[in-house]
Image (spheres, rainbow, N blue to C red):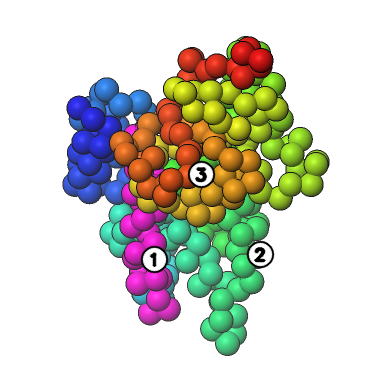
């Protein structure tokens, strides 16, 4: 089965499952896909859904109703997990729901939202929240949310850095000379790929000058976003390059590059030809 078909089937199954703890169910349905690939598909589909529904689910009236429901549940001594259950009910991810409740809790006298810095600080350190119950409920939400919140973001950054380091090690093992993005920033470049090859390599007959590592699953929407925000800038400055989506990608992504050559793979190719070998 092609990656495109697997992706479509995974996405279709995703919408039929409960909002939380979907990875375990998907593992049983798609045992041939890695846990990291499934996590990426779930996260990306969740983000698409939140983009479409977040505004509607966080109007002042909706947040007020959720806040009253939360405070009433506290008064009734309901068991912990109130915000998690509310998250399942309304369709907001746990972290986004907790953020809305915190914003309402710290609402100013004129009913305007508190400063974003304050809310972000409280989300990063729930011990600073002045209400014990809200602090604990927020903490539970952050633990349960794989897509949003400081824990989720730290996990994504760690995974991304892990694969960048892995790519550097693989290139060193292949005796490929390169600069990584820290070197490039020191040289004054603003937008930098993860790897700039000091000597180009050829992959399947195509010369490439740079490599970008993405610890993600590459679907068309994700890839178009990276083309706009990063990849075309690299192409304009350095020429043809390679993007590695470590957790797979849908077929035919290279066709949307408008004649700008950017190869796409899910691992570092083993058939690289060092250009200086033929000088």
Q: Which of 184 and 262 is in front in this view?
A: 262
Q: Name the residue under label 3.
A: 152
Local packing at callout 3 (Cα closer than 10 Å; few below 14, some 14-19, many 20+) is some
Is 187 left, or right, of 23 in this rendering? right
Residue at image location 54% in from the left, 35% down from the top = 241
What's drawn in magenta, residue-wise? 37-61
x and y percentages locating residue 178 in the rendered image = 69, 26
Q: Nearer the viewer, residue 271 or 76?
A: 271
Height in image: 91 above or below 36?
A: below
Mark 1 or mark 3: name the one nearer the start of the chain: 1
Residue at image location 51% in from the left, 44% down from the top = 152
Residue at image location 66% in from the left, 15% down from the top = 279
Instruction: Identify the secondary structure beneath mark 2.
Output: helix
Q: Mark 2 and 3 residues: CB-CB less than 8 Å, in contact?
A: no
- Is 43 included in the stretch rendered in magenta? yes
Q: How far apart are marks 1 and 3 (CA)?
A: 18 Å
Mark 2 or mark 1: name the one nearer the start of the chain: 1
- The number of callouts visible is 3
Q: Name the residue under label 1.
A: 54
Mark carried by residue 117: 2
Mark 2 or mark 3: name the one nearer the start of the chain: 2
Q: How far apart are marks 2 and 3 (CA)?
A: 18 Å
Q: Distance between the residues labelled 2 and 1?
A: 20 Å
């Amino acid at each position: 089965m092609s990656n495109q078909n697997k992706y479509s089937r995974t996405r279709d199954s995703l919408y039929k499952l409960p909002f939380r703890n979907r990875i375990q169910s998907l593992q049983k349905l798609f045992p041939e896909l890695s846990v990291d690939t499934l996590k990426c598909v779930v996260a990306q589909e969740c983000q698409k859904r939140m983009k479409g529904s977040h505004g509607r689910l966080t109007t002042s009236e909706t947040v007020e109703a959720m806040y009253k429901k939360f405070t009433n549940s506290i008064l009734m001594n309901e068991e912990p997990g109130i915000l998690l259950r509310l998250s399942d009910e309304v369709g907001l991810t746990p972290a986004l729901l907790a953020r809305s409740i915190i914003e309402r809790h710290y609402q100013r006298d004129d009913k305007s939202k508190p400063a974003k810095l304050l809310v972000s600080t409280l989300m990063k350190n729930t011990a600073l929240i002045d209400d014990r119950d809200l602090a604990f409920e927020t903490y539970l939400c952050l633990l349960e949310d794989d897509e949003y919140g400081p824990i989720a973001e730290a996990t994504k950054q760690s995974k991304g850095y892990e694969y960048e380091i892995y790519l550097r090690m693989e290139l060193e093992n292949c005796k490929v000379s390169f600069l990584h993005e820290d070197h490039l920033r020191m040289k004054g470049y603003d937008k930098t790929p993860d790897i700039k090859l000091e000597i180009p390599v050829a992959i399947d007959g195509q010369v490439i000058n740079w490599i970008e590592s993405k610890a993600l699953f590459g679907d068309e929407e994700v890839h178009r976003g990276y083309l706009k925000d990063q990849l075309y800038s690299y192409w304009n400055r350095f020429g043809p390059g390679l993007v590695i989506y470590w957790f797979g990608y849908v077929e035919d992504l290279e066709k949307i590059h408008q004649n700008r050559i950017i190869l796409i793979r899910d691992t570092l190719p083993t058939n690289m030809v060092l250009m200086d070998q033929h000088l």
